[in-house]
Amino acid sequence: MAKSKTKTKRDPRKKFKLPSFKLSSQQKLVLGSFLVIFGLILFIAFVSFFFTGEADQSSLSNFTSRDIKTQNWLSKSGAWLSDFFIQRGFGMASFIFSGLIFISGVYVLMNLNKSKLRKHWFWGILIVIWLSVFFGFFKDENDILGGTIGFEVNSFLQDYIGKIGTSLLLLFGLITYLAIRFKVTFESFTHLFKSAKNNIKDEFSGLDDENIVSFDNNLSDEAEAIKSAFDLSDDTNNASETKSSKITPVEFEVSTKDIDEDLDIEMEVEKVSEELSEKDNLANKLVEDFGLFDPTLELAKYQFPPLDLLKKYDSEGIQINQEELEENKNKIVETLKNYSIGIASIKATIGPTVTLYEIVPDAGIRISKIKNLEDDIALSLAALGIRIIAPIPGKGTIGIEVPNKNATIVSMRSVIASKKFQSSEMQLPIALGKTISNETFVVDLAKMPHLLMAGATGQGKSVGLNAVLTSLLYKKHPAEVKFILVDPKKVELTLFNKIERHYLAKLPDSEEAIITDNNKVINTLNSLCIEMDNRYELLKNAMCRNIAEYNVKFKARKLNPNEGHQFLPYIILVVDEFADLIMTAGKEVETPIARLAQLARAIGIHLIIATQRPSVNVITGIIKANFPARIAFRVTSKIDSRTILDSSGADQLIGRGDMLFTQGNDVIRVQCAFVDTPEVEKITEFIGSQKAYPDAYMLPEYIGEESGTSLDIDISDRDKLFKEAAVVIVTAQQGSASLLQRKLKLGYNRAGRLIDQLEAAGIVGPFEGSKARQVLVSDLTALDKLLEDEI
Ligand SMILES: Nc1ncnc2c1ncn2[C@@H]1O[C@H](COP(=O)(O)OP(=O)(O)OP(=O)(O)O)[C@@H](O)[C@H]1O
């Protein structure tokens, strides 16, 4: 966590620092191999001791003399070491020491977890002591099994608690060890005993038939599995273990009884031929032959924009101004003191634009009292944009956010380059900026699932939108995401024109991919509704719950493209000035937006709408209800803040990308990442200069209301191609404008008009949303008759 903490008061007690024993890699290699070799030496010396120990006894007293020879395989040192460890030490148990030293070497060499090693040593030493005492118990004189220590401890114990006491103490030691180390319980003992009894019973049940014997073996395998499952539960849960061990024997008895009964009946087992469902098989074969479907293959050489296209700022990185911090702290403490509010502690967290002072008031102070002092604190600090969060959710402190005198720019580059963004596995990750604790703030648009952005003019909305779009361009391939950009201001998003054939989606008849005309917005929104219905149909047929599942299935070649299935990219609709749209088109826009917002989340259509005017007639209840994720830039009044966030706070922001983000409950203050127009231009140029799809992503055609559902079309006003169009439609028995466009080579508008005229003439039925219109005339003869009757 990139948190920079500064204590305003220094702790007078200087902490004593332990010298650190960090070894370099070379030192580790030396120490590790020393320990491994030493462990081996001990082991060899100990083994040799059993053969040569007696012979070497006499030579040990003259250990230093070179003339005296020893027989130990490791000569004098081997004889001495084994005498020291085995004879005078712990006896046989000393082998454990050689093992412990050996594995210590391995741990050092491989840099393994040291706490595990400590555990090995702890238990190892205990076992050494126990074994030594245990062996010593059976010997009346000092013997190499228990060593001197085993013998001495034994005689000490036996003097005080006698032989019986010592043996019971040894048993207690063993039980304690098993209970703690292997989590053995009393029930597992009894259970083990019972299942052993059952196994013996099975063995004596005398099964002759070979087949049945193997059948029974399978069963005992099964029983073994059940047994081990119970053993496992013994380890973890004491409560459940009592239950399970009680049930087990009953289950075993029932199953063996069943088999006993079945033994007399001859059973012929018919071999069942395995049947694979054809679809599965085919899909697997397809994947085997062609691999998983790769949607990015068409633009396989596509290069994601490099980080260098984004600007680096000199003033990046938080600079701590100790004086400013001290000054602000003193002012806060003084102001609160003036209102007789004492402070127990205060802590500062410095963010890019604001510093958060977290205070813990003295016991008994009312929180509302501090909250009411917002204006007084602002006055004493002579600063705008002071926000009091009382209490900070989940922390039990009160936060006072004070703007820094010199705000630091959060560059788009720094957030895009952050590990958090780069390694994010989100479906639609967006790096919005940095939080007050200077952490990169990344959110998933797919989870939001729609985003509402509001703020007064000039506070950073357009930059925010660009940050969202840039994030997605850096992370998503053109095959995976498509944007529909609505820009009534006509200037903000024009730069994205360059990536039309990579990333944009548009209506079939429109020339410009970026929509600036409000009438076209209505058509686009309705077309998006049709796309939504179509996608739901596809998902239903594929039996998938959401787009992610659907795409996984499609990639695994389990969906047939001939049945209309295709890889579905996410579609993101961005509206830059929503207020303008609502003012001019009202309900016509609000209805499809609300419909999309309610239903589109599962099928990968997400909306981002931004507005300058966060009044209730723009952000209506129905829109608010469907946009739980909201961003508020600075607004001018508390009411506006409430309209956006359902709470005040946005009116106390300081502008220039300072924003509040909420996704339902918590409100998080974030400094929006700054991406300038030249940077966006460079990115779009970089993408635009690469190989693209032949056209933008085509949305389904939508015939608008204005193209007339009124049926009083004058016969004399009919298009010259009316008759040909009627013939095409009746022959194909399909009432769609796109069919006319293709067959008669018409523009979209003319084809739309012709369809209206055909409807008026009773040849096709009314508009039915995503479906083609019904053709009401069955054949050409009927059509001729109908047209003759008209004249
Ligand atoms: N995140 C940011 N960091 C630093 N400065 C910013 C940031 N966002 C915006 N600004 C500054 O504020 C100015 C206005 O931002 P922007 O154009 O995004 O405002 P806006 O809300 O879209 O305004 P309008 O609604 O009038 O289009 C920018 O030119 C820039 O100087």
Image (tube, grey):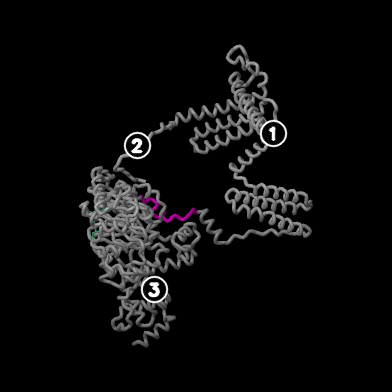
Quote the CA–CA distance across marks 2 and 3: 76 Å
Q: Is residue 523 above or below residue 445?
A: below
**Magenta stretch encompasses residue 299:** yes
Picture coordinates of residue 674, whole percent (x, y): 27, 52
Q: Is residue 181 left or right of residue 51?
A: left
Q: Is residue 788 above or below residue 184?
A: below
- Which residue lies under the disc numbered 1? 163
User: First in sequence: mark 2 or mark 1?
Assistant: 2
The amino acid at mark 1 is: Lys
- Which residue lies under the disc numbered 3? 769
Residue 411 seen: no
What kind of element bears circle 2? loop
Label 2 CB-ligand 1 distance < 8 A: no
At x 23% / y 54%, what residue is drawn?
378
For disc 3, the neighbor class at 10 Å (few under 14, some 14 to 19, many from 20) is some
For disc 2, the neighbor class at 10 Å (few under 14, some 14 to 19, many from 20) is few
- Which residue lies under the disc numbered 2? 13
Q: Which residues are magenta?
A: 290-303
